[in-house]
């Protein structure tokens, strides 16, 4: 149980049910299935009919097919993530029990020996360095008033890191293999138009990203995308499409226009990188970003002032995103497989590896 506690220390989730709650649940009508069996339906099946006409299942889906595909992807991914978490916890628990039996001690004792006893209490310097990270969570109380809490949080983190280290050692020692299949996800056809791209045009995996420079989560996920391009060099291509948060309104497109104008000088990605790291996009600051990106600022300013073509391009991106069901940023399509939001890197890797395995 200690292993499980350490593994889930950051989840902050717990649930309890009183006898009253349990009794009440018995009287509730069972919930409907989370997702209707979309694929199992006969496309030619009649779902409505009248004298002189009918509607088939295929016709019903003509206008809502993309939304249904998105729902199915989210359901299948959430289900897989839940199964994966349960499998990891079960497998790690078995490995710990096996190692404990091998040593002739209890699981709690082996965890104490490998985790608690191998983690040193945080030093004063470590506490002072870590305090600013959680200062706001502690309501900005002075360090001398919350030092024990800071020490405990830091100790928990160090123990969690050591636990992960040790579990990796156990995986290797006992040659752990898992065989949980990744779900077969529906694909949504997404055009790459003539938008900026990084990576080989021959790459077997294409990630189409819809994002906005003024979206905090888009900026947060960008380093992950760069890492994926490096780790899968020649195998992954990234296509960027603008999806301004304010919709197709030129007033909210300024950073996107700035990047597209940089593209006229062959420096789209230099400006893109700069904007993804920036926190402000006012006129003078944008000009400074253009300067630091190596642009001919005079030509860039001319483009910013005569931006009809750029606005049309960005609007086309936005409309293309809406057509495939994008409703927020960032949104990704990996060979047509939808990932919504700033998901963990592991989810990208799972889909990419599956796509490469099918090649």
Image (tube, rainbow, N blue to C red):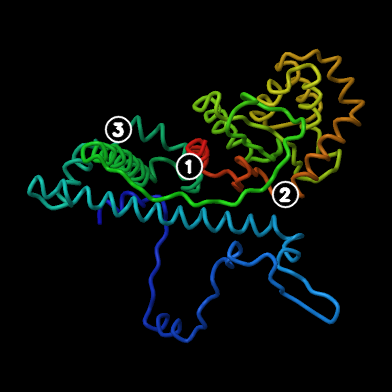
Q: Which residue is mark 2?
A: 324
Residue 44 picture location, percent across and down? 70, 67
Element assignment for label 1: helix
Considering depth in this image, is 75 or 189 the residue closer to the camera?
189
Considering depth in this image, is 159 or 217 the residue closer to the camera?
217
Considering depth in this image, is 103 or 234 the residue closer to the camera?
234
Q: Is residue 244 left or right of residue 119?
A: right
Could you tell me if the residues under marks 3 and 2 are in contact, i.e. CB atoms within 8 Å? no
Element assignment for label 3: loop
Q: Is residue 175 left or right of residue 226?
A: left
* Quarter holding residue 37: bottom right
At label 2, counting other C-alpha atoms closer than 10 Å, the crowd grade (few under 14, some 14-19, many 20 or more) is many
Determine the residue positioned at 42% across, 59% down: 13
At label 1, counting other C-alpha atoms closer than 10 Å, the crowd grade (few under 14, some 14-19, many 20 or more) is few
**Between discs 3 and 2, the one toward the N terminus:** 3
Q: Which mark is residue 350?
A: 1
Q: Which mark is nearer the camera, 3 or 2?
A: 2
**Between discs 3 and 1, the one toward the N terminus:** 3
Q: Which mark is nearer the camera, 3 or 1?
A: 1
* Quarter holding residue 266: top right
Determine the residue positioned at 44% across, 84% down: 26
**Between discs 1 and 2, the one toward the N terminus:** 2
User: Label 3, label 2: how many angstroms apart (C-alpha)?
Assistant: 52 Å
Q: Is residue 220 left or right of residue 113?
A: right
Q: Which residue is mark 3?
A: 123
């Amino acid at each position: 149980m200690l292993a499980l506690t350490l593994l889930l220390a950051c989840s902050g989730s717990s649930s309890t049910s009183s006898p009253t709650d349990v009794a009440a649940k018995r009287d509730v009508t069972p919930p409907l299935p989370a997702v209707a069996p979309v694929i199992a339906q006969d496309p030619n099946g009649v779902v409505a009919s009248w004298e002189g006409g009918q509607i088939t299942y295929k016709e019903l889906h003509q206008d809502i097919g993309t939304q249904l595909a998105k729902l199915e992807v989210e359901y299948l991914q959430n289900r897989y993530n839940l199964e994966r978490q349960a499998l990891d916890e079960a497998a790690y628990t078995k490995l710990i029990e096996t190692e404990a039996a091998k040593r002739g001690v209890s699981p709690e004792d082996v965890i104490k020996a490998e985790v608690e006893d191998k983690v040193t209490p945080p030093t004063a310097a470590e506490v002072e360095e870590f305090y600013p990270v959680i200062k706001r969570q502690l309501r900005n109380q002075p360090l001398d008033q919350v030092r024990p809490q800071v020490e405990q949080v830091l100790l928990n983190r160090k123990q969690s890191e050591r636990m992960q280290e040790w579990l990796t050692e156990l995986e290797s020692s006992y040659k752990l293999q898992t065989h949980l299949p990744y779900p077969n996800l529906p694909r949504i056809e997404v055009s790459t138009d003539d938008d900026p791209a990084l990576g080989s045009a021959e790459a077997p995996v294409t990630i189409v990203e819809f994002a906005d420079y003024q979206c905090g989560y888009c900026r947060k996920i960008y380093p992950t995308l760069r890492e994926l391009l490096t780790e899968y060099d020649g195998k992954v291509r990234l296509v960027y499409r603008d999806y301004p948060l304010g919709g197709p309104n030129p007033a909210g497109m300024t950073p996107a226009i700035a990047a597209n104008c940089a593209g006229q000088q062959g420096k789209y990605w230099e400006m893109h990188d700069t904007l993804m790291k920036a926190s402000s996009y006012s006129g003078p600051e944008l000009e400074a970003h253009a300067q630091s990106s190596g642009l001919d600022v005079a030509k860039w300013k001319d483009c910013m002032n005569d931006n009809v073509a750029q606005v049309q391009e960005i609007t086309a991106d936005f409309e293309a995103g809406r057509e495939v069901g994008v409703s927020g940023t960032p949104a990704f399509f990996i060979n047509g497989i939808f990932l919504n939001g700033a998901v963990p890197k592991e989810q990208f890797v799972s889909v990419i590896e599956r796509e490469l395995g099918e090649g």
